[in-house]
Amino acid sequence: MSPITREYIENIFKPLENGDYKALFAVVQDDVHWTVVNPNIKSFDVAGVYDKAGFVKAIAPLNACFPSPLALTIQHILVDQGGHTAAVELRAQAIANNAMKFDNFYTWICEFDDSPQPKIKAVRAYLDSAHVKAIIDSNH
């Protein structure tokens, strides 16, 4: 495997700042193990464990709360010394369809496979679930 670098991570996450998810999802395996914490408690509807298609479906109610795709701004990127895992902190700031302010922070721990062009094989996503639940509940 070519170890992942900060530059590689930035290149796949930077388009999220314009609400463009194509570059990211192009390097996510279809059978990714995407965990939205906490799947054991399931404190809000998005919490769970998904493959790529399942994750996209799970976040659809959140995405429907906004007039355009939610933009995620990179706050920090950390890559482990072995170049197999990256932690990416993101921030979303938007106004929901009902005029409610949305300001949420996310941390995604991304594990990469051994392919020459590394793909994401697992994600653990941490976020303010109460804020996401409030946005979804107040917009549906």
Image (tube, helix red, strand yellow):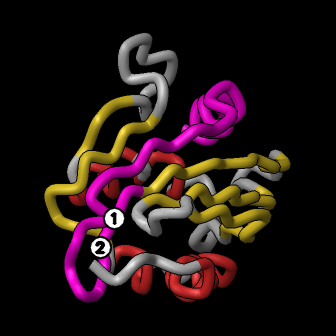
- Does residue 17 sit above or below 92 in this rendering? below
User: In the image, which residues are magenta?
Assistant: 111-140
Q: Are marks 1 and 2 in contact (CB under 8 Å)?
A: yes
Q: Is 94 on the left or on the right of 90, as rendered?
A: right
Quadrant containing the N terminus is bottom left
Local crowd size for mark 2, using a 10 Å CA cut-off: few (<14), some (14–19), many (≥20): many
Residue at the left extreme, as displayed: 31
Q: Nearer the viewer, residue 126 or 67?
A: 126
Residue type pointed to by label 1: Phe
Q: What is the number of the mark on residue 112? A: 1
Q: Nearer the viewer, residue 113 or 100?
A: 113
Q: Earlier in the sequence, mark 1 or mark 2?
A: 1
Is 127 covered by the magenta stretch?
Answer: yes
- The residue at the point 63 percent across, 38 percent down is 127
Disc 1 versus disc 2: distance between alpha carbons? 5 Å
Residue at the front extreme, as displayed: 81
Q: For mark 2, what is the residue?
A: 119
- Does residue 27 sit above or below 31 in this rendering? below
Q: Position of residue 20 (x, y in %)?
A: 53, 82
- The residue at the point 59 percent across, 52 percent down is 65
Disc 1, SS: strand
Disc 2, SS: loop
- Does residue 25 sit above or below 38 in this rendering? below
Residue type pointed to by label 2: Lys
